[in-house]
Image (cartoon, coloured by chain):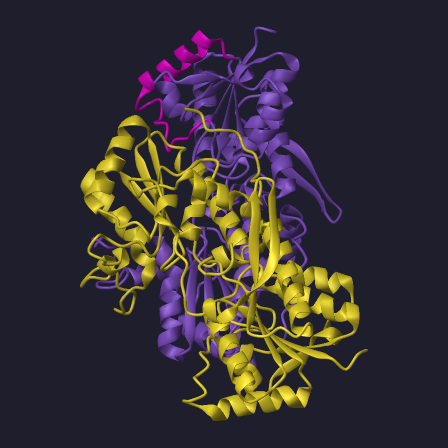
Chain colours: A purple, B yellow
Amino acid sequence: MSDRCILVGQSGGPTTAINSSLAGVIAAGVFDGTRIEGMRYGIQGFLEGRSVRLDEAFVSRVDIELLRNTPASWLGSCRYKLPLPSEDEATYERLFQRFEEIGVEGVLYIGGNDSMDTIAKLSEYGREVGSDIRFIGVPKTIDNDLVGTDHTPGYGSAARFVATAFNEIAYDANVYDLKSVTFVEIMGRDAGWLAASSALALAAPDLVLLPEAPLDLDVMVERIASILDEKNTVMVGVSEGVRTPDGQLVCERAAEPGVGVDEFGHLATLSGTGRYLAALVKQRLGCKTRSVELSTLQRCASYVASRVDLDEAFDLGHAGFNAALAGETGKMCAVDRVSDDPYGINIELVDVVSVANKVKNVPREWISEDGMGVAKELVDYMRPLVGELPAQMASLD
Amino acid sequence: MSDRCILVGQSGGPTTAINSSLAGVIAAGVFDGTRIEGMRYGIQGFLEGRSVRLDEAFVSRVDIELLRNTPASWLGSCRYKLPLPSEDEATYERLFQRFEEIGVEGVLYIGGNDSMDTIAKLSEYGREVGSDIRFIGVPKTIDNDLVGTDHTPGYGSAARFVATAFNEIAYDANVYDLKSVTFVEIMGRDAGWLAASSALALAAPDLVLLPEAPLDLDVMVERIASILDEKNTVMVGVSEGVRTPDGQLVCERAAEPGVGVDEFGHLATLSGTGRYLAALVKQRLGCKTRSVELSTLQRCASYVASRVDLDEAFDLGHAGFNAALAGETGKMCAVDRVSDDPYGINIELVDVVSVANKVKNVPREWISEDGMGVAKELVDYMRPLVGELPAQMASLD
């Protein structure tokens, strides 16, 4: 056992792959005898003095393998925005004091945008006070909206769930001899990466609606009507963050007075998009409509996890460990895609300041010209991250 | 090729396993050269003259294998209640004329309660008019509420999805350091079999609420409060059909004036149960609450199908084929369980009249004494139908 110590935390929303990154860190530490401390409930719990010795909790390969396949944040998470040192230096002093007490050589933080902001602030403060502790970010978010990396761990598994579930719902929607329109509502407030993955379903969507392409509701209704002239069942993959051309969220329409309120009169959340569109199409076209919200399972359906995603998440955790011990700081481990087919990547380090607080959207040219579908470039981008889907018998026409 | 012909249809709500029963029928027909005709959209589509030659559509083992793993009703389905012959003999005359034209020797109908009613009426009418066409029912329903059979195809896969999804949502709910209560709403209007399967989750529910046990809302809130004294996260599996002791559906409370209405002011459907309970607990206890509806995926999540379920569904289809050719009529193929562990079954034939229009509920003694959990007998009953669930790392305490 060396006297080196790496501290690791998980932050932000849970995903299917975030524990695989944690497993990558632990495996690296166990292999070379480095002590691995885990923050309970992220930097917030750590500030309250809560941590756990991971190299002692995970002594066998079986435990590490189980962790790889366990959804959500095993260490616990937080949604805590670190203040600027100029606003609250005491918090930084407490944190660095705790780091010193534990003998931390490097801090790894696995998370999304806010977590990269935390790493940026800590590494900057460390430089200012002359600390030699290293701070490295390991990306994760099902939204896939981080810049500086080809994609983020968690996205491939969430996308695989969306594509699989969309396909199954499409089969389910097609069993009766009647006209129907089904909206499948998919997470993604600002970026449409996850909603776009519905396009990978074997029973492919007729329309895919993303936040990046403003949605003219009249045009959509007309388009659906013309598809219904040709066949019974229309399937739509829709992002919860879709907006009309005036910039209004569709779900905000669902929250207008008297509609879209919850049981106790509170305004509904973003999840009204699919329900609003289903109600609108029913009102205009008179056919059966339905909205299915994929909900929480998008970020935790580990039974349909993407193998590529879990492997890359593990490797990125491992790379973060290596980077910290190699003396790097203020960096995020990132994926550089070499090729779509055959799929290949390199792992590299990027400056975390260039990543924090930015959002990567789906490029407009990866969306079909009419704004209601995905272009081939986007399909080619997504497919290797999601992997092969189980084969099924095509529907009768 | 013999000149024998079997006609097969699918009816009622789609499930993950109903195509496996169809595959069992087709495989039997292809093997011995019997012509297999399929009804498009059940008896209703067949009455309109719509059928398809299945032994020609499925020529390879690969196709049949794909069909086994395809969710929903490949032939199409209907929700059509056959009138009594005394009310509408013309419909029977048309049906039997179509049977004769096609040269049908036996009719197999794969479905739930209403489908068994159809088989009962057709076989009874056939007897009366001296027809020698045989009518056999093959059971399917995710609700598992048919009498005369230990369980129904479709249930095991739906239960496997529920247990798996419940487990993942439980992991997801436990990541933040705060008190929270999550209700997972599960299908089952009258019978709690499917909601009970949440008890198989590795991260087991704290409460399981079934329609068979009247729910005192005050007692439930008190119970949740006392569990929250011990730990952060309370998980509840709740059937959409839960009722209060006065017999009112909880979801009807959600539909009281001003609450639980949809975007266009229509009363909400059964799906308000979880949302109502989440809103109630939030109001009374002030903690974070959440309701997750498992929705459509319960009946179509083929990627998490139970192998036992798909195999039995296939075998029951095959058995129906054999029974029809052996001259049986007015029967349903049923499962007779020989043993829980090791799990073993026999397939037998039961009188379809004894099955139609009845509902099998969860026995009260299989529910825990306080009415908010499941007894060991029920777990032992469900476990072999669902199969082993993927191992995961237990949560930190």
As drawn, B250 above or below A9: below
Q: Estimate the x, y position of residue B77 in percent, counting from the top left.
A: 53, 73
Describe residue A397's horizontal placement relative to residue A287 as left or right.
Answer: right
- Quadrant (top left/top right/bottom left/bottom right) for the N terminus of chain A: top right
- Name the residue rendered at 66%, 83% in the picture: B104
- Name the residue rendered at 49%, 56% in the picture: B297
Describe residue A367's horizontal placement relative to residue A340 as left or right.
Answer: left
Residue found farthest to the right: B1
**Figure disc tally:** 0
Magenta region, residue range: A75-104
| Res. B23 visible in picture | no
- Name the residue rendered at 71%, 79% in the picture: B5
Residue A83 sits inside the magenta stretch: yes
- Quadrant (top left/top right/bottom left/bottom right) for the C terminus of chain A: bottom right
Residue A185 sits inside the magenta stretch: no
Q: Estimate the x, y position of residue A22 in percent, counting from the top left.
A: 55, 27
Describe residue B128's horizontal placement relative to residue B19 as left or right.
Answer: left
As drawn, A14 above or below B142: above
Q: Estimate the x, y position of residue B319 in percent, counting from the top left.
A: 65, 64
Q: In terms of depth relative to the viewer, which is nearer, A229 or B200?
A: B200
Q: In terms of depth relative to the viewer, which is nearer, B353 or B259?
A: B353
| Res. B323 visible in picture | yes
- Name the residue rendered at 43%, 25% in the picture: A121
Q: Estimate the x, y position of residue A191 in percent, counting from the top left.
A: 48, 51
As drawn, A67 above or below B36: above
